[in-house]
Image (cartoon, grey):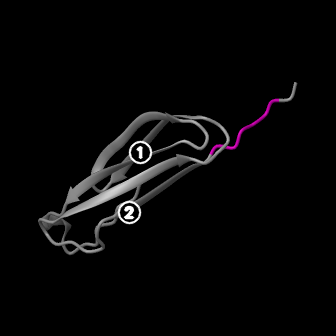
Amino acid sequence: SDALIGNPNLVVTQSANTTQATVGETINFTYKVQNTGGVPLDNVVVSYDHPSSTILSAISLDPGQSVSGATSFQVQESDVPGPIINTV
């Protein structure tokens, strides 16, 4: 029989509560991870590089399913002059 091959696809969106911050201020990040493909995804891990942390660890997402959350980062003197670039 012919095997059907699914179309995996994961979309991650994020936003921050500010575009500028000074030392001591906290930047709040929100994120959404959505399985926009046609197959279940297992062991999905989401980590930020700044701040360095894993915010989702080994979750499963069915097609169309999403998960949202938040993390924060306090700006340190060592982050100056910036910019602080946060990628997921």
For the stretch drawn in magenta, the main secondary structure is loop
Label total for image: 2
Is residue 17 found left or right of 66 in the rendered image?
A: left
In the rendered image, the vertical position of residue 88 relative to residue 56, given as above or below: below
Q: Residue at x 28, y 70 (%)?
A: 18
The residue singled out by tag 1 in the image is 46
The residue singled out by tag 2 in the image is 15
The front one of 2 and 30 is: 30
Residue 81 occupies quadrant? bottom left
In reply to whether residue 5 is colored magenta, the answer given is yes
Give the CA distance from mark 1 to mark 2.
15 Å
Is residue 12 found left or right of 63 in the rendered image?
A: left
Is residue 72 found left or right of 23 in the rendered image?
A: right
Q: Residue at x 38, y 63 (%)?
A: 15
Q: Position of residue 67 (x, y in %)?
A: 45, 44
How crowded pointer 2 is (Cα within 10 Å; few <14, some 14-19, many 20+) is rated as few
Q: Which residues are magenta?
A: 3-8
Q: Position of residue 7 (x, y in %)?
A: 69, 43
